[in-house]
Image: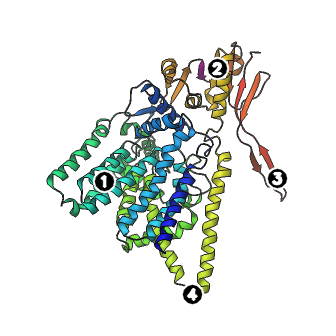
């Protein structure tokens, strides 16, 4: 390919990257999930008051529904809200922007490692249209931002090795450090990957002066200090213990298994099924379960992390993964070693968590997987061109049809199917309810929102642009064992509704889910219409259905 044509192709890939991630960013997905509204409102509160929703001044960790969020995305979003206002676009801006930059950095990283033109272009194109990366770049997922800083850190480290300059090593370390405080899993992935790079390029590192090497170590340890100091706190790793294989649910599974062999001699349990061996077995099971073809190529994760009917990668990449991993193990492309170890590091770490495979926790392995797939795809392409003309044309035609259909199937699923089938998951009608309440709240002394309706209070705060200082002073919370619920907020009350009893309270608006209607119902909000398709007597009748999201009741006339 001629140089000017190659540069034009690369530019078009970069333009497509930004277009796919910013097109209708505020309405696809068609609603903000609870983590997005919490993140956005806390950023808004920080911007206006310097405090989070609980009144903590410039916190390092943000309490959210009983969990703790790391600070980078929140503070970045405060800047986006300053520019764009408190809206869906501002909340998702940094994920879309840094997700786009990830493709560009990946291109230059592979180019520096390979000194080739074909592999960087193929890899960046695959990542540009990858279902997993596209989905996560269009939602305020902290892991997507963390992944950018990890990829940037690797790129800067490779640059530092090439130029052997201390500043570039420090910039790389800083990038890894930012990822460390962006998403929980990267608190383990980032240090492990940086240490691997130090070992992988140890011969070049040894050429640095003693002062330079000492400074790298000091900065590395310095970045770890806040992490280490909070390691055992609720905001540290102990706060994430519920998702680890050492957690209570995992131990309950072990105890349940041992209960079946309780009648056997105790020595058998102690030797073969003690806690240590069962944890190891649980860990190995997690690692093996990661290799799920259904997850990667068929249906992906749940409705909150994928479109639900397309895998995290395309089906046409199945052979490219097989060939790519084969080439990795054969060491035909030495640069793949770096990406193979990168993949192995993430795999080893996520094996410590429950629920594998997990689209969010596993996300930092997406770049090495795409690179491995791109090498396999290139090899398959080269093999096709070596065939006889007739066979080559047939294979090319079939390949183009498969690739095009796979991509279009994902695109149409994301734009048309996903907003309807995932409307409840993505809280599509929370905005409508929040604005309805804001418009009508002056008519009532009290507004009771039924906790069974599954309306999240951060939606109210976010869409109403609720005054943060007023929220801090008037809100009360119910600190449950696993989840924090808001109890009161000004005239709003969040609790279980007993409709007949609560209707006796004068000048009160009651919001519930889909409960039986009565004469006191004044309005309702429904999800987008969907079709139920049945097979009856060799026919396929379709029934349009509108599910009720919220109903409003009052006895005030």
- Residue receiving disc 2: 447
Residue 139, visible in the rendered structure:
yes
**SS assignment at label 2:** strand
Q: Which residue lies most toward the left here?
A: 210
- Residue receiving disc 4: 388
Mark 4–mark 3 Cα distance, whole angstroms, equals 49 Å
- Residue receiving disc 1: 194
Q: Could you tell which of marks 3 and 2 lies nearer the N-terminus?
A: 2
When the figure is inspected, residue 546 is found, relative to residue 294, above or below; the finding is above
Q: Could you tell which of marks 4 and 1 lies nearer the N-terminus?
A: 1
Mark 3–mark 1 Cα distance, whole angstroms, equals 58 Å
Q: Is residue 389 magenta?
A: no
* Quadrant in the picture for residue 163: bottom left
Marks 1 & 2, CB-CB < 8 Å contact: no
- In front of the other: label 3 or label 1? 1
Q: Left or right of 167: which side holds 110?
A: right
Marks 3 & 2, CB-CB < 8 Å contact: no
Q: Residues within 10 Å of mark 4 (few under 14, many from 20)?
A: few
- In front of the other: label 2 or label 4? 4
Region in magenta: 491-497
**SS assignment at label 4:** loop
- The image shows residue 372 at horizontal and vertical percentages of 44, 66
**SS assignment at label 1:** helix
Mark 4–mark 1 Cα distance, whole angstroms, equals 47 Å
């Amino acid at each position: 390919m001629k140089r000017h044509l190659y540069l034009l192709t690369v530019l078009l890939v970069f333009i497509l990257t930004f277009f796919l991630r910013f097109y209708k960013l505020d309405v696809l997905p068609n609603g903000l999930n609870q983590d997005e509204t919490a993140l956005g409102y806390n950023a808004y509160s920080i911007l206006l008051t310097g405090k989070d929703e609980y009144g903590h001044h410039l916190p390092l960790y943000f309490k959210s529904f009983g969990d703790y969020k790391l600070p980078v995305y929140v503070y970045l979003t405060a800047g986006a809200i300053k520019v764009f206002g408190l809206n869906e676009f501002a909340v998702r801006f940094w994920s879309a922007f840094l997700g786009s930059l990830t493709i560009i950095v990946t291109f230059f990283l592979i180019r520096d490692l390979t000194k080739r033109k074909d592999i960087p272009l193929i890899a960046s194109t695959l990542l540009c249209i990858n279902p997993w990366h596209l989905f996560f770049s269009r939602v305020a997922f902290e892991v997507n931002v963390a992944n950018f800083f990890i990829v940037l850190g690797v790129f800067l480290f490779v640059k530092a090795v090439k130029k052997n300059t201390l500043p570039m090593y420090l910039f790389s370390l800083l990038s890894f450090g930012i990822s460390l405080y962006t998403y929980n899993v990267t608190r383990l992935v980032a240090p492990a990957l940086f240490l691997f790079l130090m070992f992988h390029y140890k011969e070049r590192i040894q050429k640095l002066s003693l002062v330079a090497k000492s400074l790298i170590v000091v900065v590395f340890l310095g970045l770890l200090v806040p992490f280490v100091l909070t390691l055992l706190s609720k905001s540290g790793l102990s706060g994430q213990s519920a998702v680890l294989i050492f957690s209570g649910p995992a131990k309950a599974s072990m105890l349940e298994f041992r209960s079946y062999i309780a009648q056997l001699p105790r020595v058998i349990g102690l030797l073969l099924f003690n806690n240590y061996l069962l944890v190891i077995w649980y860990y190995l099971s997690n690692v093996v379960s990661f290799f799920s073809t259904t997850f990667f190529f068929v249906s992906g994760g749940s409705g909150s992390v994928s479109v639900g009917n397309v895998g995290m990668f395309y089906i046409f990449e199945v052979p490219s993964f097989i060939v790519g991993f084969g080439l990795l193990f054969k060491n035909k492309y030495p640069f793949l070693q770096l990406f193979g170890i990168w993949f192995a590091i993430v795999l080893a770490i996520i094996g410590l968590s429950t629920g594998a495979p997990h689209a969010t926790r596993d996300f930092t392995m997406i770049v090495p997987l795409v690179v491995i797939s791109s090498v396999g795809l290139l090899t398959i392409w080269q093999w096709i061109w070596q065939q006889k003309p007739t066979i080559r044309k047939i294979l090319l035609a079939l390949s183009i049809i498969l690739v095009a259909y796979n991509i279009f199937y994902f695109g149409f699923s994301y734009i048309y199917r996903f907003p309807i089938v995932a409307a409840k998951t993505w809280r599509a009608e929370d905005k409508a309810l929040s604005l309805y309440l804001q418009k009508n709240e002056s008519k009532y002394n009290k507004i009771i929102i039924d906790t069974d309706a599954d309306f999240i209070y951060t939606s109210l705060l976010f869409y109403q642009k609720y005054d943060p200082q007023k929220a801090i002073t008037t809100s009360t919370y119910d600190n449950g064992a696993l989840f924090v619920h808001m109890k009161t907020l000004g005239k709003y009350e969040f609790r279980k509704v007993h409709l007949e009893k609560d209707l006796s309270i004068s000048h009160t608006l009651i919001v519930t889910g889909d409960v039986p209607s009565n004469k006191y119902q004044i309005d309702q909000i429904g999800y987008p219409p969907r079709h139920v398709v049945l097979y009856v007597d060799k026919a396929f009748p379709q029934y349009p259905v509108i599910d009720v999201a919220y109903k409003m009741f009052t006895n005030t006339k």
